[in-house]
Image: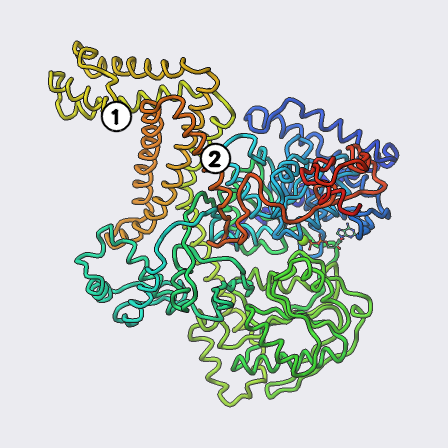
Amino acid sequence: MFSFLTKIFGDPSEKKLQLYRKELEAIKKIEAKYRDEITSLEQVQAKTHEFQSKFEGLDVTDDDDKKKIKEILETIKHEAFALHRRACELIHGQTFELDANTQYEWNMVPYDVQMLGALALHDGNISEMKTGEGKTLVATIAAYLNALVGNSVHIVTVNDYLARRDAKEMGIIYKALGLSVGVISHGQSFEEKKHSYSRDVVYATNNELGFDYLRDNMAVSDENRVMSTLWYAIIDEVDSILVDEARTPLIISAPSAEPTSQYMRFAAIARKLSENTDYKIDEKQKTATLTEEGINALEKILGVDNIYVSQHYNDIHHIENALKASTVYKKDIDYLLRNDEIMIIDEHTGRVLPGRRYSDGLHQAIEAKENATIQEESRTLASVTFQNYFRLYKKLSGMTGTAKTEEEEFYKIYNLEVICVPTNRPVIREDRGDLLFRSEKGKFDYITNLVEKLYEKGQPVLIGTVSVAKSEYLSHLLEQKNIPHNVLNAKHDSKEAEIVGAAGKYKAVTIATNMAGRGTDIKIDDRVRNLSGTVTIEGKAGKQEYPLGGLYIIGTEKHETRRIDNQLRGRSGRQGDPGLSQFMISPQDDIMRIFGGNKLFSILARFELHPENDPLVESKMLTRNIESIQKQVEGRNFDIRKHILEYDDVLNQHRLAIYARRNRILKGNDIHQEILDMLEHQIQSIVSSVYDIHNEIDSAYVTDIVKEINDFAESEVISRDDVDDVENPEDMLTRVKTLLSGKIENLRSQGDEETFSDFERQLTLASIDEMWMQHIDKMAHLREEVAFEGYAQKNPLVVYKERAYEGFMNLINDLEFRVIKALLTAKPAEAIESVELESALRSDYTETATASHEHTNLFQDASGGFPNIPKKEKTNSDESGIRVVKVQNTQSTPENIDMSNTPKNAQCPCGSGKKFKTCHGKNL
Ligand code: ADP
Ligand code: MG
């Protein structure tokens, strides 16, 4: 549809670019002026303060203010962009000390195309800029402008290493401009995080941000929260974060007590069932479903009449997990068994994901299948999808080298348009069509042979694989030929960045899965740039010629989506460098095996006698065929993500409502009126339900009401005399309400008002949290249940929405019931004590909780909760570990403080919250 509209109306992205080009001219005029006027960083910073003052008193969360803010941003935009470039000019060539061991020479002044990219970001678009175009710098321009508003701008990276790197390096320009910068990384203490979030620009991974958001909404008091208003986010590698990672939500969970013996039992049952008669598997969808016969068989084994009645509901879930575990999930492809532990292998990247677990009991089912120790299942305390997290920002934009193929999704789900920004220099890399081989083994033999020849000439090669297993296989082949090489499976982001960074060196051979070292710049030197000559491989079908020079990319397999292929190719040919890329295909490749179809095999049938390690002709038709397969897979994946979102959207409304209610309480507002409203709702429901039975005000009705109310309050709160003369249900409601609120007022007047108000808040908060966690669980079950409704020809989503609404109404009622009941039944002193105890327990609970994405535990050490995370990583003086030299720093730095008399175990004077001996006193 998009391309069709494009043909009629022209590429909208091109139109916007035209506008940005005009703006660029305006910016350049201001720049020329600034070159005379602004000659020092003091002047730059003064200008920044002048800009900042324009936003004073305005609040981004207020709709009217937001409009004004937008207008002011537009009026200062050109000046701010020009000032950024001017600041870059002023520090150009200067060396800064990032930390004790790292010097960094600033040598960047944004290119024109980078200014265009930044204009597109500021407008809330996705800037598609190829790898090596300098997106890191582009983000700083838009971040600078938007941070002037007075709220933090978040720059989102794919891993902790990149967050730290970018915060440090880009910290130079922010500080030159007079802004502060912070970095959020895993393992920071509460104080460190809180401090970092208060900076003008904050670098963080999507996971940390999402988890902090969830944890903040589990906090028991406002001081325990770390984040502030979610104003503007710029997402780097936006396709990876909003597309690849969007299929699974972020989850914070704590252990629960499902007996682990269950899993062994169902693994044994699964072995008794047979494929196709009892169950069917679908390798594409990774599902196993029982047939009618299978269900009968299961019922017989379990000794139940009807497995669909709800108390056996979980059994279906268990058996299907056991079946999936035994058929669809394969050892060494989907997971590894290492030291009695099942470790997931990421399907997109081929990395092993230590500590991550499949959800919903699947992981345990696999543990049972492999006879590994079964670990406990956990309970979800909070969860959110990235889609719904990032929609919380007032403004959003992103950058990546590869967004165009997912343009429709970005637009439909996030309302983000993709603007293709031209490269600074033309791309001269040669992207070849795919080579087809008869067998996978033959293909790898060819690749090994080719790499050997290239290596002899000094030609650097980067070889992309789809899995750890294939990386290792290829590595083994190269070893046999004595070709030195590096294998990267993204275990250590920083080390890996170093190795990938060197992949363009003379004679470098690097094998990498696709996420390995993403975000790292691969530079080539002149020797590699100017390599000459050709490597030729003669074959039966003709000869393949490979002209040398630049970086070579060999893809050993096509990925599920074109985008990931383009990522791989894009690692070569940066900034106008030479280079070449080619993919090698065989019928055993995943994408061919699972989605390939007949076309491929009809091609192959014609070449039965062809040698295996000799490519069949480079086939345009084949390449097109694969592309159409990829488009189908992309479409299917989009549907899955949309589906997840449709369901999460329902829960999201509940989440926002509950979080808003929590926030009001945390902000310390008095909620006494709210409590009285709850009381009224509760009485109303008792009064009307009794009235419904009797249908008139008579003696029996009054007796029943008195009984019900006293039962509810668990004491004689009213007597018959109190309500003997009421004439209608409204009267009854008013009367009972007056009596019960009188009781509550009485309670309130016994202590001081503030304590009571606090008590009301804590009580309500505790009820909200408990009920909310239960609700999340119920909704997860509901989702599974409605999947079965499909049999009844109903749209599961519609059923889900209806029942979710009921569920939410019940949640509200239940929590109000609990609060009012507690108020009516407890003695004040005891009640306050019990709530305090509970809130302490809850904060313990959240402390032992683990945070996970991809249904998995990212933080094995269970330090994910707030407050007081044990500190693991040591950071330097500044929150981003940056010490800027030469740039005037207006903040008081720890270096200005005399620390010589600080006792070792005292808090460090720098305010980090750490002990002196582990902070500034470390090296004394
Ligand atoms: P991308 O994220 O777009 O792949 P990076 O931000 O990693 O690119 O930048 C790639 C390289 O280009 C880095 O080494 C960076 O220092 C350099 N670079 C970026 N912008 C400029 C510039 N305006 N002038 C000189 N070098 C630049
Ligand atoms: Mg980058």
Q: Position of residue 95 (x, y in %)?
A: 85, 48
Task: Between residue 61 and residue 169, name the one nearer to us.
Answer: 169
Q: Which type of secondary structure does the marked residue at label 2 adopt?
A: helix
Residue under label 1, please give it.
712
Q: Residue at x 46, y 84 (%)?
A: 605
Which quarter of the figure is the C terminus placed in? top right
Label 1 packing within 10 angstroms: few (<14), some (14-19), many (20+): some
Residue 842 is situated, as x and y percent measured from the top left of the image, at: 45, 37
In this image, 863 relative to 46: left or right?
A: left
Label 2 packing within 10 angstroms: few (<14), some (14-19), many (20+): few
In percent of the image, x 68 and y 70: which residue is there? 486
Comparing 665 with 553, the one in front is: 665
Task: Name above or below for residue 406 compared with residue 484.
Answer: above
**Amino acid beneath label 1:** Phe
Q: Secondary structure at mark 1?
A: helix
Q: Is residue 211 left or right of residue 290?
A: right
Q: Is residue 693 left or right of residue 893?
A: left
Q: Amino acid at mark 2?
A: Ala
Residue 432 in view: no
Residue occupying the point 34% across, 35% down:
811
Residue 209, position in %: x, y? Answer: 57, 43
Q: Quick check: 807 above or below 104?
A: above
Residue ranking furthest to the left:
699
